[in-house]
Image (tube, grey):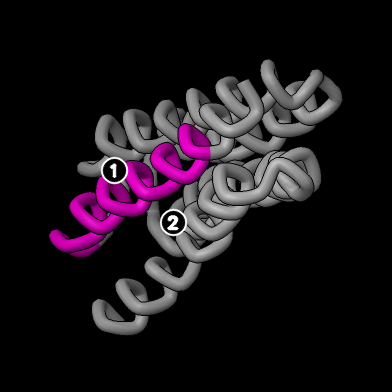
Amino acid sequence: MKRAAFVLGLCGLIPFIGLGVLALASATYASAAAGMQKDYAAAVLAFLGALHWGATLIEKLPTARAWISLGWGVVPALWAVAVTGKPITLALPWLGIGILLTLGLDWAMRRWHGWPSWYLPLRLMLTVGALLGISLTMVAIS
């Protein structure tokens, strides 16, 4: 599973980095690339929350922790919805902040979930890659 998670996780960075590079390389496509980046970042943010639902559903957490974990699991999707209606120059940074916050909550809840030891280092690497792609796009459209 580790290899599959790393390979597929890295594949998930292709849109982040690719759209950032496209936005930098082409003024013609920068706006379209930024819009796609916003949509992709929102989808990824919602996915990161859903990981807590998956982990909670297969584990036997005490009721209070289950409520917290499931509750947190819906926050990133709500964050994404709230942010995507904003202009790109506001939405992209806020989506990046949301992605970073999900990493922080993953780290804080690491003992609650039975995640393997390699999961959080992978999440850190993927978060840095996502933020790099978002930053490239922000530079291009600023």
- The percent coordinates of residue 16 (x first, y second) are 53, 53
Q: Which residue bears the numbered disc 2?
A: 55
Q: State if disc 2 and disc 1 touch (CB < 8 Å).
A: yes
Quadrant of the frame with the N terminus: bottom left
Q: Which residue bears the numbered disc 1?
A: 112
Examine the structure image and report whether residue 72 is included in the region drawn in magenta.
no
Q: SS for tag 1?
A: loop
- The percent coordinates of residue 89 (x first, y second) are 68, 20
The amino acid marked with disc number 2 is Ala
Q: Is residue 2 left or right of residue 42?
A: left
Task: Please state which of residues 103 and 141 is positioned toward the viewer in this rendering.
Answer: 141
Q: SS for tag 2?
A: helix
Most common secondary structure along the magenta stretch: helix
- The percent coordinates of residue 93 (x first, y second) are 56, 22
Q: Residues within 10 Å of mark 1 (few under 14, many from 20)?
A: some
| Residue 123 in sight in this render | yes
Q: Quadrant of residue 119?
A: bottom left
Q: Which residues are magenta?
A: 116-136
The amino acid marked with disc number 1 is Trp
- The percent coordinates of residue 137 (x first, y second) are 57, 37
Task: Please state which of residues 46 and 68 is positioned toward the viewer in this rendering.
Answer: 46
Residue at position x 32%, y 29% in the image? 104
Residue at position x 46%, y 72% in the image? 11
Q: Is residue 92 left or right of residue 8?
A: right
